[in-house]
Image (cartoon, grey):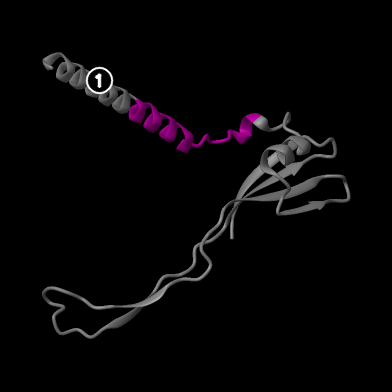
Amino acid sequence: MNADVGKGRCARKRVSRLGVRGLGIGLCLFLTGCATTKIDWNSRIGNYTYDQAVAELGPPDKSAKLTDGTIVAEWLTRRGYSGGSVGFMHGYGYPYYYHPWYPYYEPPSPDYFIRLTFGPDGRLRAYQRVVR
């Protein structure tokens, strides 16, 4: 009977070690997936095309073709929140014990865009980060 108990403990330890190892690997994969890469737009000037941008970023939110054949396109990179929040605050602790409630307002945050300018040959000429 003691041999059966020993096997059970050993099996539990093995399962425990595998579980911890699996959680560690899962955590590493999760954190790796959350990492974002910054795009070096300076290195793409002159050799990045409009077609590559559409394939990578999707269709632009706004675009315009100028008379000389230049394409100016904007992609949304981060959306701000539209409506600010309104609420009431009350001070606490000394010297705020007897102050009345007062309203506060949090203004909306802007949207962030990347504006890419492509020459008539379809190659990237310039980029600009735009906040509105």
Q: Is residue 98 left or right of residue 53?
A: left
Residue at screen point 81% across, 37% down: 122
Residue at screen point 30% across, 82% down: 102
Asked if residue 5 is positioned above or below residue 26 in the image, the reply reads: above
Q: Is residue 45 left or right of residue 112?
A: right
Where in the figure is residue 58, as x and y percent of width and height?
A: 70, 44
Q: Is residue 37 magenta?
A: yes
Where in the figure is residue 57, as x and y percent of width and height?
A: 67, 42
Q: Quadrant of the C terminus?
A: bottom right
- Give the labeled residue for mark 1: 11
Q: Residue furthest top?
A: 3
Asked if residue 39 is positioned above or below residue 58 in the image, the reply reads: above
Indicate the secondary structure of the residue bearing disc 1: helix
Asked if residue 10 is positioned above or below residue 80 in the image, the reply reads: above
Magenta stretch, overall SS? helix
Residue at screen point 71% across, 39% down: 53
Q: Residue 47: which quarter of the image?
A: top right
Count how many numbered circles sit on residues in the image.
1
Asked if residue 98 is positioned above or below residue 52 in the image, the reply reads: below
Q: Is residue 43 left or right of residue 32?
A: right
Give the magenta-colored segment's residue range.
22-43
Q: Is residue 11 magenta?
A: no
Q: Is residue 18 left or right of residue 56?
A: left
Amino acid found under the numbered disc labelled 1: Ala
Residue at screen point 24% across, 78% down: 90
Q: Quadrant of the N terminus?
A: top left
Where in the figure is residue 78, as x and y percent of width and height?
A: 55, 52
